[in-house]
Amino acid sequence: MTIKNERINSNLQKEISYIIANEVKNPNIKFVTITACDVTSDLSYARVYFTTLGDHIETIKGLKSAKGYIRKTLSDRVELRHIPELDFIYDESIEYGKKIEEKIKEINEN
């Protein structure tokens, strides 16, 4: 990954987090944390990984319905010629880490 892509990923992650936390008024989107953003090399698509404390299925529906608003707001804030299509993906790594931690505790107790 190039330095340019890393910078764009970081900037998009920061701006999307701010937009979701402060400007999106969808009741299905609660307690969302953007964990990563991965933009393709041609900057046409961006996979946005998130976690949530609520139901992630409802959150995905809410994020997909707010996708247009988020892209429009990004176009005003981020200096890119073309704002990538956003694809929201639930990040299961935190849940996986918790399961591994529980297994380690269980093994240590026995």
Image (cartoon, rainbow, N blue to C red):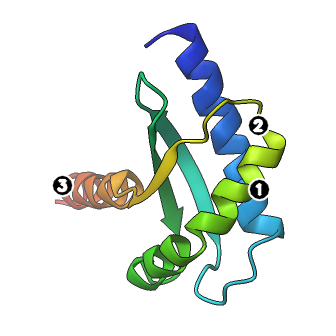
Q: Write the residue at 64% across / 55% down.
A: 71
Up the image or down, 64 lies above or below 8; here it is: below
Q: Nearer the viewer, residue 67 or 110?
A: 67
Quadrant of the drawing holding the C terminus: bottom left
Q: How far separated are the C-alphas under marks 1 and 3?
A: 49 Å
Three-letter residue code for mark 1: Thr
Q: Which of marks 2 and 3 is in front?
A: 2
Give the image quarter of residue 4: top right
The answer to whether residue 67 is above or below residue 7 is below
- Real-space Cα distance between discs 1 and 2? 9 Å
Q: How far apart are marks 2 and 3 (CA)?
A: 48 Å
Earlier residue among tags 1 and 2 = 1
Q: What residue type is labelled 2?
A: Val
Question: From what the image shows, is residue 20 above or below residue 43?
Answer: below
**Element at label 1:** helix
Q: Which of 33 and 104 is in front in this view?
A: 33
Which SS class for mark 3? Answer: helix
Quarter of the image with the N terminus is top left
Q: Residues within 10 Å of mark 1 (few under 14, many from 20)?
A: some
Q: Name the residue under label 1.
A: 73
Tell me which residue sits at (66%, 30%) in the image.
81
Horizontal side of residue 1 vs 13, given as left or right: left
